[in-house]
Amino acid sequence: MQEAKNVFRSQILKLIRGQEKNKLMKWDEQLRALLFSLVNDLLVQRSNQNQKCIIGGFSSLDDEVSWELGFPHQDQLSYPVVDQDDLIFRRSDLSDLKEQVLFGRTFKVPSSDKEIVTPDILIIPGVAFSARGERLGRGKGFYDRYLKNFSGTRIGICYELQLLDKLPSNNQDENVQYVITNQRIIDCSKNRTGD
């Protein structure tokens, strides 16, 4: 199973890295419009219940969707930090994030003095997704472990070319409720049968 996942990861990341920068920027812009629309709809639903939402995001790596630019709810954002083998989210503005090197990559994370929070809506990166909500991450399991006990709304984001019919998965893999690509919003609950 791990071998199959690694092959998928390698092929998809190579495909993304081979795209022209201008094309990726256009796709990012298209995806942001769809993401902002869905998040706004979810926030309106929650505001009708007098709930202030915390949104969990992530600081995009160079081979991930750049979703943060112009995000309209900056004051509600939190970002992940690796804490031993787990993720925790800390409330932070994008401009306050600090660089941290982990696993040979540079990530932007909130400082340790920022408040630890539990997001209500989580924007989740992935190397690939399926329309059923299956997610292929980078292989360390941080998001799967976090999502195990997460009861909020799960939104996976990726480019359309990262959307596959089926992904190799096991009982440790956690699904998302929505997948947003640069072309569409997918309500994954409508694509699951027998779950």
Image: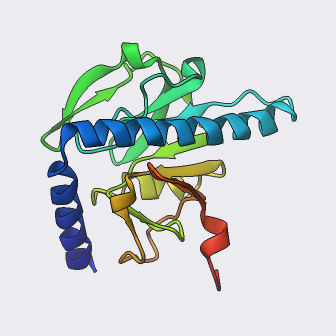
Looking at the picture, tell me which residue is in the foreground, 164 or 89: 164
Identify the residue at image location x=78%, y=34%.
44
How many numbered discs?
0
Residue 136 seen in the figure: no
Find residue 190 and report its image quarter: bottom right
| Residue located at (60% from left, 59% from top) | 177
Above or below: residue 95 compared with residue 157? above
The quarter of the picture where residue 55 lies is top right
Would residue 58 appear left or right of 78 to someone viewing this image? Answer: left
Q: Tell me the quadrant of the picture where the C terminus can be found.
A: bottom right
Give the side of residue 23 with respect to residue 172, left or right: left
Q: Residue at x 48, y 22 (%)?
A: 70
Residue 25 versus residue 151: which sits nearer the camera? 25
Relative image position of residue 39 (x, y in whole percent): 63, 38
Which x, y percent locates residue 132? Answer: 54, 71
The spot of residue 22 in percent (x, y) is 24, 36
The image's colour scheme reads: rainbow
Side of 49 where 82 appears, left or right: left
